[in-house]
Image: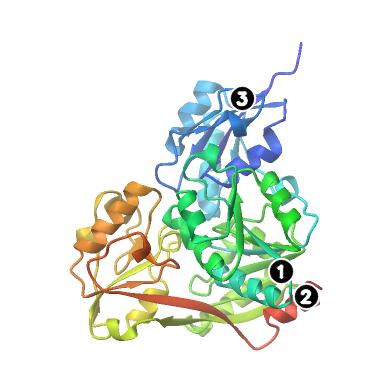
Amino acid sequence: MPNKKIKIIILGAGGRDFHNFNVCFRNNSAYQVVAFTAAQIPNIEKRIYPPKLAGKFYPRGIPIFPEEDLPKLIKKYEIGEVIFAYSDLSHMEVMRRASLALSSGADFRLLGPSSTMLKSRVPVIAVCAVRTGCGKSPVARKILKILQKNGKKIGVVRHPMPYGNLSSQVSQKFQTFEDLKKYDCTIEEMEEYEPLIANGGVVYAGVDYQKILSKAQKENDLIIWDGGNNDFPFFKPSLFITCLDPHRPGDEISYHPGETNLRMADVVIIGKQGTAGKNSVKQVLDNVKKVNPEALIINARSRIYSDKPNFIKNKIALVIEDGPTITHGKMDSGAGVVFAKNIAKILIDPRPWAKGSIASTFKKYPHIKNCLPATGYGSEQIRELEETINAVPADVVVSATPIDITRFMKINKPVARVFYDFEEIGRPNLKDILKKFKLI
């Protein structure tokens, strides 16, 4: 009698879950993936992981359900294993999901880097973090600039954000702003891709990272892995950099899989030191020394500035911040609030004017008060965000999201943008590190 397949469910958020399936289960006849579940990101459940991506064992694709359905799915389909595959949850929250799976009759499993990392023929520099919003993006951009000045041809591979039609997002390449329109990108995707493109970078992303890697390593001398949330990289790195945030001291050893990134790091960056307290910086440094004493440490700060500071001065300001950082990253402010609170007359609380899903976001994340997270996981939510911005009775919009929202929204009040750049404090700096690892 043939061995019975192990039935599994993969818990995810439209990224790591698909990668783990592609690498570990798609062609594995010992397992039957009954379903994915979706969390964190709105409106990504009730889809199908398409046959085009699911492979020969799944001619009808694989359904995606809300994570709240997990207990009844385990019982209905006699699930043997639940695979946890998304990021930026506290250790307690991960184990709460484990307890739910175990009590419902299934085993609970995490797949680690050695099981899921793909090997590249060209060097890979991984830029990861211990939490969402630690400042990975400006670090990746600075590394890109250094390598470009040294004559390297660089491909930036971004952690997946496949929130739309999965069949059309198998392997994507972004070289111009027109490519953002071509692939109908969400605000969250544009926030990551647009600044890199503006700096002359070529960005690769999608769903099938074996195909993405094949293309990126063929076209480039070196790959920068630009991580998402606090996930560990999909590619085996030649240099592993992990960013830490002293505004959230202690999180570096209490969130999954951020602590994994801290323990694996060759280099640790303790950023945002210009605005964080000395005791918080010391607490983060002490934790680094406890769990990864061999890591090289870069001290850094963010240089925060505006293109139109006079628009903000003594005005009633609506601040828009990066969505993921403020929502599941659980920060109550970002660069926009830090800059505007010192010169604006008042920062207005946008909650009374929030429309549709934007109002739901505030209910889900009650810590957000004096800023508006730039959530836009689809055309409807982008419209609701635009309506919310226009309804708030502010004198000026202070936009600290990395994209120019006026390119695709009609805003009925002046917009001043706030930017933040990565700056090292002392040595070693990024250039020193790249030389040490023989990457320049």
User: Relative to residue 274, is residue 309 drawn left or right?
Assistant: left
User: Relative to residue 133, is residue 268 drawn left or right?
Assistant: right
Please say if 142 is above or below 33. below
Quarter containing the C terminus: bottom right
Residue at 29% x, 66% y is: 369
Please say if 69 is above or below 438. above
Mark 2 is surrounded, within 10 Å at the Cα level, by few (under 14), some (14 to 19) or many (20 or more) other residues, namely some
Evaluate whether residue 132 shows in this view: no
Q: Which residue is mark 3?
A: 58
Q: Which residue is mark 2?
A: 440
Quarter containing the N terminus: top right
Residue at 79% x, 59% y is: 122
Sequence-wise, the earlier of marks 1 and 3 is 3
* Mark toward the viewer: 2 or 1: 2
Q: Which residue is mark 1?
A: 292
- Give the x, y percent position of residue 26: 67, 32
- Callout 1: SS: loop
Image quarter of residue 425: bottom right
Q: How is the image coloured?
A: rainbow
Report how far apart the C-alphas of labels 2 and 3 lie in the structure: 45 Å
Camera-nearest residue between 405 and 22 = 405
Image quarter of residue 251: bottom right
